[in-house]
Image (tube, coloured by chain):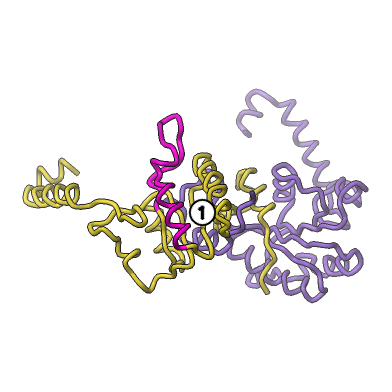
Chain colours: A yellow, B purple
Amino acid sequence: MAFHLLERGREEGRRLADVLAEAMEKIGHCTQCRTFSEQALCAICANPRRDASQLCVVESPADLMAIEQGTGYRGQYFVLMGNLSPLDGVGPEELGMGLLARRLREERPMEVIIATSATVEGEATAHYLGGLIRELDLKVTRIAHGVPLGGELEYVDSGTLAHAFSGRQILPG
Amino acid sequence: MAFHLLERGREEGRRLADVLAEAMEKIGHCTQCRTFSEQALCAICANPRRDASQLCVVESPADLMAIEQGTGYRGQYFVLMGNLSPLDGVGPEELGMGLLARRLREERPMEVIIATSATVEGEATAHYLGGLIRELDLKVTRIAHGVPLGGELEYVDSGTLAHAFSGRQILPG
């Protein structure tokens, strides 16, 4: 990309540099959900039509976007900006769990959906969060693990297959 | 493989041909679950220690093997040997659904688990089977669709993400 801009797009390159510098300056975190935002409240938190009875906890702003675009979810979010990783010095406070706990105590949503990744770190974070949320006597759910769409059983790894099997549900009529 | 046998393994080649010919001759289908078997009853159907209260419906003997090796399932199986595909002339009778229905009526398992693939054909077959089994007033479940183990949300397709979201479950404590 750098070579392309140097050879054929010096003007675009300058503009990109300006926009990037401006973004670095202006974009901070939403004070309520911690996603990237230019305002103190991001567009989702500021929208009064979002369903306040559901709160979805995700790892990153990119995951928030993926859920917004891929599902019909219309509730609120909380962005951890990472996963628990004690060896790297990332504990509950670095992930804003104090802020999350305060928010849960005040708003008391009907359901907290933990949508961290299905990786080892994501599972550990989900486990920790589960304990925290249950202590507040709130309903906590986890997104499903299983066979991805289009997936043939024969080619799915055995861990996923075991999860898909133990997570089976009544077939809707 | 053919070149290797011709150059360095004529004897092995002959033995392979014999074994293959013998398999083609001797291996048929289990009369109860339709998987490949040398006997009239396969090793699983003939095993009295298998749990007769659960019946898992799969597409192929390879899927049966994957479930045996990857999960703790210890119930019975039924192998469709394919998926519904009306354009290719594969209807319910070709998949042994008459045999399955008779077996369900006689044995009345507590749960029928549909473990066809998450492909379009697998889903269509699951939908058809669901209707058939519900008519017999039996409990019917479907293996979970969702994020595969190790999967990061950001890289999962939106269909899978939507399924993972709608299939979310109470987080076990």
Crowdedness of circle 1 by 10 Å Cα count: few (<14), some, many (20+)?
A: many
Q: Which residue is mark 1?
A: A114
Please identify the quarter of the rendering in which residue B125 is found: bottom right
Which percent across, then down, holds residue B171?
Answer: 60, 53
Against A52, residue B52 (above or below) is above
Would residue B158 be found to the left or right of residue B54 on screen?
left
Do we see residue B111 in this rendering? yes
Specify the amino acid type for callout 1: Ile
**Of residues B145 and B38, the one drawn nearer to the viewer in this rendering:** B145
- The magenta span reads A79-107
Please identify the quarter of the rendering in which residue A158 is found: top right
Which percent across, then down, holds residue B66?
Answer: 70, 46
**Of residues A109 and A120, the one drawn nearer to the viewer in this rendering:** A109
To which chain does the residue with label 1 belong? A
**Of residues A33 and A118, the one drawn nearer to the viewer in this rendering:** A33
Would residue B38 be found to the left or right of residue B164 on screen?
right
Residue at point 55%, 54% (across, down): A136
Residue at point 17%, 48% (across, down): A25
Give the residue at the far left of this rendering: A11
Which percent across, then down, holds residue A31?
Answer: 31, 55
